Image: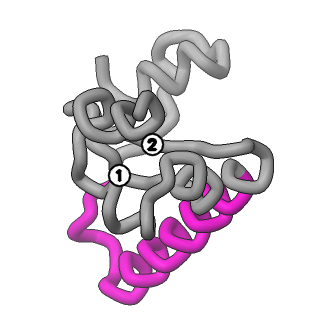
Amino acid sequence: MDIATSANRKTGRPAGHEIPLKLSLTELSPEFLTESEVIYQRATQSLLREISDLCEGAIIVNRHARVVWISEKYVKTLRLGSAREALGREIELNLLSTIRD
């Protein structure tokens, strides 16, 4: 299924009335890509701030269960010196054991 077909299913357009959504990254200017990256980074930071503010402590791990982000509140809960101590560590084997001690 191509992008246009997928978009048509979401909008309810009948077959034959495809929305042309084909866009190549080579068609985008370097300035656009740079600006997009800046916007993405700002949005990510904003989201992480919101998560941190809403939770008593928060941690994000990757698909290998390694820490990629941890809130300052959770750093204190785990009695770590800094967030850097947690980054890259396996969540269950290393970090959660500090709570049990």
> What is the magenta range?
23-50
Question: Is 13 positioned to the left or the right of 17 in the image?
Answer: right
Q: Are marks 2 and 1 in contact (CB under 8 Å)?
A: yes
Tag 2's secondary structure?
strand
**Mark 2 Cα shell of 10 Å, populated few (<14), some (14-19), many (≥20):** some
Is residue 19 a member of the stretch shown in magenta?
no
Q: Which numbered marker is on residue 60? A: 2
Q: Position of residue 20 (x, y in %)?
A: 44, 41
Instruction: Give the residue type that dot 2 points to.
Output: Ile
Q: Which residue is mark 1?
A: 68
Q: Quadrant of residue 31?
A: bottom left
60 lies above or below 46: above
**Which residue: 50% across, 54% down?**
79
Tag 1's secondary structure?
strand
Q: Which numbered marker is on residue 39? A: none
Q: Position of residue 74 (x, y in %)?
A: 57, 50
